[in-house]
Image: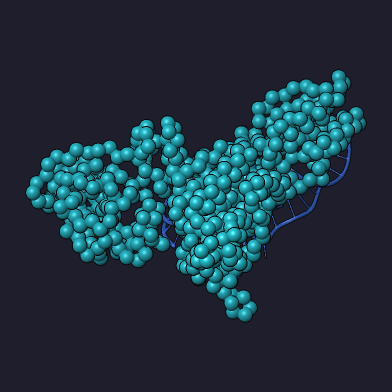
Chain colours: A cyan, B blue
Amino acid sequence: MRWSRAFIPTLRDDPADAEAVSHRLLVRAGYIRQLMSGVYSLLPAAFRVRAKIRKVIEEEIDRIGGQEFLLPALHPEEIWDETGRIEVMGAEMFRFVDRRGAGIVLGMTHEEIFTTLAQEITSYKQLPQLWYQIQTKLRDEPRPKSGLLRVREFTMKDSYSFDLDDAGLDEQFDAHFEAYSTIFRRLGMDAVAVEASSGAMGGSGSIEFMVSSPSGEDDVARCVNCGYAANVERATSQVSAIVDEPGPDAPEKFATPGVRTIEDLVTFPGGADADRQIKTLVYMIDGEPALVLLRGDHPLQEQKLADQTGAIEARPAHPEEINDLMGADAGSLGAVGVSDIRVIADQALEGRTNMTTGANENDFHIRGVDVARDISVDAWYDLREVQAGEPCVECGEPLEVFSAIECGHIFKLGVKYSEPLGATVLDENGKARPIVMGSYGIGLERNMAAIVETHHDDKGISWPVAVAPWEVVITVVKVGDEASMHAAEDLYAALQGAGVDVILDDRNERPGVKFNDAELVGIPYRITIGPRGLASGEAEFTTRATGATENVALADAAAKVTELVRAAR
RNA sequence: CGGAACGUAGCGCAGUCUGGUCAGCGCACCGGCUUCGGGAGCCGGGGGUCGCAGGUUCAAGUCCUGCCGUUCCGACCA
């Protein structure tokens, strides 16, 4: 490619509405342009990067036996009815009616459709199968953000495994774990595998591959000592034991005028430390109210609440709902004596005595509460969100918490889809059994953005060779100089002949413009040809990532660069 | 969905409070000359129904109403 003919619209200024680094740089370096909220056009340079990411993924999934498909983006609504997911997905599914009045949805994932195809697997002898596709997903995200990191239309590699039993699933799941680890390594990213919540996918377990970044939307708790790592939606930690003082025989109500928060009660005379209080939250769980109890200093992790209760929707109750239900406002709530509302409590409250909580009457609290004696708890769950510094559940060392981008997610689905859709096989005893499934996803454009998030500096992007749109740029300092152009053309032809992705910057621009563009666009290697070096038969060789520059004999340049590029792919 | 901000040329912005030389600046773009190893200088030039629709007014980029769009924070999230 000759830069003079290429459409790489780089910008001098940062785009105004880009906050995330990857968003800012991908727009500025001429990779993407926004069409509407959460929808982007990929320009030629981005298309090249995406193709390389795609190739890495295909190679690794093929390596573990994947067969590539291409399924439709248009789905009949009924299929999603059969698994009940049309409800679960709600407004996030794009829907419309065709000219004949049939309900159509746009595919946001393909469990249902692949499972429908799997209905044609009829014998255990045909298992295992591993099917995948690289295809467009459409999701009406409530809040698209950060450029390519969270969008409404994107490309996903989604694979689906089909096995006779759990042992088979485990094998394919583990194979994906290894394949994913290899993929992210090849893409130049340091991905951490973490225990995750399965959310709307369901199933028995899942692992996310997380890449640390300030633009990440997820928080990961990790123990640097033993390697324990989990999304905070699932993470646990050891709770420091509290030794309770003996309490009274019965709880006692006392006046607490103006006290509305945990913190208020800590400083209120006759109050209690936060870890000696019971925090009472009101949640609407699939429309039914419930009291959620935690230690005063423990935050609720909402996804845990949803996961453990099996809820489709769990939301905080509105102030009016709280008052109607409890006869008091948030800040004065408690579960003592409550019997007509479901009470869900965090395990850290088990066995606690002499606690303080709200009295369900504004300006009054109750102290001397013995949880076992005074509160009728319907269910005990792990509900609190882990905080940085808390002791690791495995080894007791302090946990760190960092924000991360979810670059891949693998799920053990079990029979969640095969059962309702009737995808069964006959086993060796002639008995029909639902196929045991797994599903495995990687978002291509999100990974492109994640790579930028982890490979940039103040000059722009610095792609790993494996995904760079061009591996080498030949920068001609003085296009008008015949000898320079001649040497550059020779080198360009030699590198092309060696199979190197090379772009020749033959634009009639000042050198500074070309150097800056090469760095902004992020091309890993640059060979600079100018009259200065040419006089002694040399060119300059610059590595983008380090900025290191050395002189190389023009005659050796092609061989040297080819070798470097091949080693780094 | 709740909160906030924004919408003027391809990009980044000023002008809006206080209606009347307010259709402007920088970059980019086109032509010319001089330059040419880290985003050149000078001269000349093209490009905008000021998001859309109503309204107020002698007069609206500017004031009022409604709508649309975009971003950020939160909620939600595969």
Left or right of B49? Residue A431 is left
| Residue furthest left in the image | A249
A261 is higher (above) or lower (below) than B43: below
| Residue furthest top in the image | A536
> A519 or A561, which is in the foreground?
A561
- Quarter of the image with the C terminus of chain A in it: top right
- Residue drawn at (30%, 63%) of the image: A289
Left or right of A39? Residue A288 is left
| Residue furthest front in the image | A429
| Residue furthest bottom in the image | A100
Q: How many marks?
A: 0
Residue A495: x %, y % from top left = 82, 35
- Which quarter of the picture shows residue A508? top right
- Residue drawn at (43%, 33%) of the image: A226
Residue A480: x %, y % from top left = 88, 33
Left or right of A271? Residue B33 is right
Left or right of A222? Residue A2 is right
Residue A118: x %, y % from top left = 59, 64
> A564 or A261, which is in the foreground?
A564
Residue A537: x %, y % from top left = 86, 22
- Quarter of the image with the N terminus of chain A in it: top right
Tell me if residue A454 can be seen: yes
- Residue drawn at (45%, 45%) of the image: A195
Tell me if residue A509 can be seen: no
- Residue drawn at (27%, 56%) of the image: A379
